[in-house]
Amino acid sequence: MSSVVPVYGSTFDGPDGQEDMPYLLTPGPLTTSRGVKLAMLADWGSRDIEFRNVIADIRRDLLQIANAGEAYECVLMQGSGTFAIEAALASLTPRGRNPKTLVVMNGAYGQRAAKILDCIGGRAYETINMGDSMAPTALDVTRVLSQNPKIEFVFVVHCETTSGIINPIEDIVAVCKEMGKTVMVDAMSSFGAVPLDMDASDMDIMVSSSNKCIEGVPGFAYVLVKRTLLEASAGKSHSVVLDLHDQWQSMEANGQFRFTPPTHALVAFHEALREFRAEGGLGARQQRYQTNKDVLVGGMRKMGFETLLSDEVSGPIIQTFLTPDDANFKFDQFYEALRLRGFAIYPGKLTTRPSFRIGTIGKLDQNVMRAVLAAIRDVLKEMGVRNLKPAK
Ligand SMILES: Cc1ncc(COP(=O)(O)O)c(C=O)c1O
């Protein structure tokens, strides 16, 4: 059998090594610690008490990180983040022509929520569309809610990973709650690294997944939601597998998933949560990612690259760089040359300007950022790229 590992050029050994695979400078799946990988070297019985305790610990810890008190429940759902978004939208948004939902969009993930509502059908919605590099404000939301009193439910993304922008969810949630609305926050790429306080803000629903800032592996996602909303959601889902109420009822009844759980991903996440606490919790994680961002963005600007966003609005999750206007810069070549040096970056997703992204989350530190900067300098030289200014 041929080996798949030692083909990468990087001799750089970062915080935990990366098993001779490239560091994943992406918004997930991302680089995880060796401890998280090792936790998967066992086959757990999904009905056994030890495994049910793992599920119970995860549900409790997630509620704690979100400061979601007695009024909230945590429901785990198999699949990627979008599965939990669809499950929550299907079970919790109003049905029929009235009342309606408001989908606040400033990138691909707001658009995806609208697409999900279209696909489920029978759920009317309005939108606010800010394009893909501007944040919606609380005022934008207030205006639309005032014009459309029939809107009862608001969907908004915390970190819009399309650009990396952090939306002002505290302000947006505050105005929605003042106006008596139910608010769902897609905090997929930010939860665990950008503060969010469900109790203090009275946020109704929050969704994230296993392979983001808690630094687990892909396999499941989670919905933190007020119990009263869950109780009222029986029979509302269009789907058997995505029925949030049913999934919750099963977890409450016997501590198990209804259908085959991603056992390895769950025990890996359990270890990831232990490491999260050992590192110092959300504050420490936010600080590490912020340092990653500062080192990366500082180094890229020094070379001549320009970022899409200003430092005030770009979060510590993922950074968008504008593609250089140099005929020798070809993204696919740039990507592959970096990958062979041990760093997998991420293509751009903007609709308006050519760009690429570099993630700053995962088991990465400032030494990894310095190493990727050195690799980028090397690759640009090899490609003969001189002009790093973007096209106007
Ligand atoms: C903000 C946001 N929402 C939703 C998703 C969808 O998650 P998934 O790709 O795990 O389905 C992502 C993925 O990165 C995301 O960043």
Image (cartoon, rainbow, N blue to C red):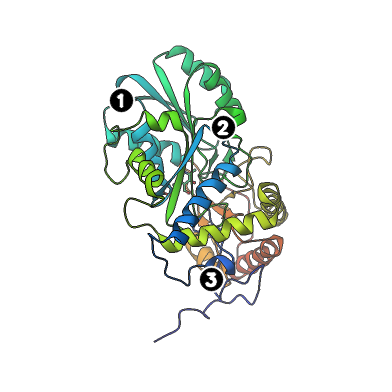
Question: Does the residue at mark 3 contact the one at mark 2 (Cβ under 8 Å)?
Answer: no
Residue holding disc 1: 95
Query: What residue is disc 2 on?
Result: 135
Nearer the observer: mark 1 or 2; the answer is 1
**Relative height, residue 390 to residue 204 (above, below):** below
**Left or right position of 174 against 50:** right
Q: Nearer the viewer, mark 3 or mark 2?
A: 3
User: 124 or 293, which is in the foreground?
Assistant: 124
Where 276 sits versus 240, above or below? below
Q: Quadrant of residue 227?
A: top left
> Which numbered circle lies on residue 38?
3
Q: Mark 3 falls on what kind of element?
A: helix
Q: Point out the tag, 1 or 3, that comes first from the N-terminus.
A: 3
Residue found 27% across the figure and 41% down from its top: 239
Closer-to-camera residue (109/181): 181
- The residue at the point 37 percent across, 35 percent down is 89
* 75 on left or right of 326: left
Q: Is residue 267 left or right of residue 291?
A: left
Query: N-terminal of the two: label 1 or label 2?
Result: 1
Query: Assess mark 2: CB under 8 A from ligand 1?
Result: no
Q: CA distance from mark 1 to mark 3?
A: 45 Å
Residue 28: horizontal and vertical position, in percent? 50, 55
Residue 330 shows up from this direction: no
Q: At label 1, which amino acid type do we have?
A: Arg
Determine the secondary structure under disc 2.
loop
Q: Amino acid at mark 3?
A: Leu
Q: How many labels sit on residues?
A: 3
Amino acid bearing label 2: Ala
Q: Quadrant of the N terminus?
A: bottom left
Report the quarter where the C terminus lies.
Answer: top right
Real-space Cα separation, disc 1 to disc 2, in angstroms: 28 Å
